[in-house]
């Protein structure tokens, strides 16, 4: 019988993409294994699109629904190995249900992160999250394949995009102005300033979750005839299908940035309250520019927050549209790398 291996990463979709190198490493080390990925329901499609995954099992997020999901886990055939790449109490509970003691768990460097956030002290070396996950699995003989993030966009996602917008999205400038946390958002008026620099003959697509569009960009597709506003209109894999045919992406430190890495689109990323030492960065992106400011108050948060603690939001307000446009031109017209 093939080796049965479970990989656990419950959320979020950018983090799940970052597990890709570890999953590929497992597949290379155990080519005939049956690899099952366990995640939360919203991310089933993304997990299934990772190269090397055979099956995906959804586990509900919280409360009684989570407990019922645990009861539904099929451990009638015990797993041989479990890669817990979440490192939480919930993922530990899941691992315990899977019938093996061969569990390797990825633990984020919480102490070093706390030192960086609280005292601005950089203690030790910070490893990119995708690489750290691979290193967690080293006792199994799993190795880094030297590759970046990858996702296989399913044909039906491409078909849905093409049927919805025909060929109007090819070679588009894709902008992701929103973010879950306000301090990760570049100011809305700056996004409008960037839009005004793009020739009206060039298609612009705005991606993002419903409700995250900055107020300054509301109704922007009615004011700019070259803009298609897709915020809240695509699933994660449809967004990947849009990105894989884009000319360039401009975004903050968000999940779509990792998605762009996974499909190989050139990108410009703006970092404000977060920093590369947290490990979530454009991992091995070949055509990437990251714009950020060295400031004593950065980082102020590991994931972003509702408002700037000091009230000025200078980390992103000091990055002007002219600078972003220059970076866009750089990644569009030549191969660059910002490690």
Image (tube, rainbow, N blue to C red):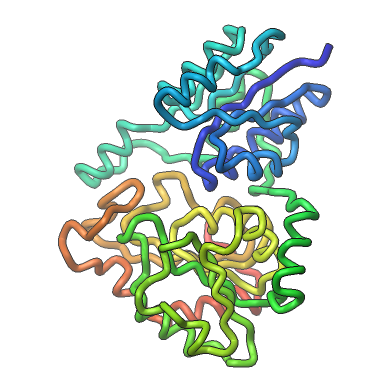
Foreground residue among 21 and 126? 21
Residue at image location 52% in from the left, 89% down from the top: 224
Placement of 120 over or under 311, stated as above or below: above
Q: Examine the rendering and report whether any part of residue 128 can be seen.
A: no
Indicate the quadrant where residue 334 lies: bottom right
Placement of 51 over or under 294, stated as above or below: above
Q: With 131 as the anchor, is 192 left or right in this view?
A: left
Q: Position of residue 69 (x, y in %)?
A: 54, 22
Foreground residue among 106 and 127? 106
Residue at image location 76% in from the left, 15% down from the top: 3
Q: Quadrant of the N terminus?
A: top right
Q: Position of residue 174 (x, y in %)?
A: 58, 72
Q: Position of residue 150 (x, y in %)?
A: 68, 48
Residue at image location 65% in from the left, 11% down from the top: 75
Placement of 27 over or under 45, stated as above or below: above
Foreground residue among 193 and 112? 193
Q: With 229 as the anchor, is 191 left or right in this view?
A: left
Placement of 74 over or under 271, stated as above or below: above
Q: Farthest left residue?
A: 310
Q: Examine the rendering and report whether any part of residue 179 can be seen.
A: yes
Q: Position of residue 228 (x, y in %)?
A: 58, 78
């Amino acid at each position: 019988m093939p080796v049965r291996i479970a990989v656990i990463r419950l959320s979020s979709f950018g983090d799940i993409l970052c597990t890709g190198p570890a999953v590929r490493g497992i597949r290379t080390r155990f080519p005939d294994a049956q690899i099952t990925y366990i995640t939360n329901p919203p991310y089933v499609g993304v997990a299934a699109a990772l190269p090397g995954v055979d099956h995906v099992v959804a586990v509900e997020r919280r409360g009684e629904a989570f407990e019922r999901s645990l009861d539904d886990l099929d451990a009638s055939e015990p797993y041989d190995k479990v890669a817990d790449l979440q490192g939480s109490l919930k993922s530990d509970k899941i691992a315990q249900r899977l019938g093996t003691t061969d569990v390797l768990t990825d633990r984020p460097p919480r102490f070093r992160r706390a030192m960086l956030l609280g005292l601005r002290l950089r203690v030790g070396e910070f490893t990119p999250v995708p690489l750290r996950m691979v290193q967690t699995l080293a006792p199994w003989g799993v190795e880094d394949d030297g590759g970046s993030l990858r996702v296989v966009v399913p044909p039906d996602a491409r078909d849905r995009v093409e049927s919805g917008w025909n060929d109007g999205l090819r070679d588009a400038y894709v902008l992701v102005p929103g973010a879950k946390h306000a301090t990760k958002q570049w100011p809305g008026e700056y996004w409008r300033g960037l839009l005004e620099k793009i020739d009206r003959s060039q298609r612009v697509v705005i991606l993002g979750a419903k409700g995250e569009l900055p107020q300054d960009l509301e109704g922007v597709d009615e004011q700019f005839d070259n803009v298609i506003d897709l915020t809240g209109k695509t699933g994660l894999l449809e967004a990947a299908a849009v990105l894989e045919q884009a000319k360039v992406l401009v975004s903050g430190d968000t999940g779509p940035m990792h998605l762009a890495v996974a499909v190989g689109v050139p990108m410009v990323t703006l970092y404000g309250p977060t920093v590369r030492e947290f490990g979530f960065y454009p991992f091995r992106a070949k055509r990437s520019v990251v714009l950020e400011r060295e400031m004593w108050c950065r980082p102020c948060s590991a994931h972003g927050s509702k408002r700037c603690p000091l009230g000025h939001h200078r980390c992103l307000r000091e990055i002007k549209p002219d600078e972003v446009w220059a970076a866009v031109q750089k990644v569009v017209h030549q191969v660059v790398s910002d490690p």
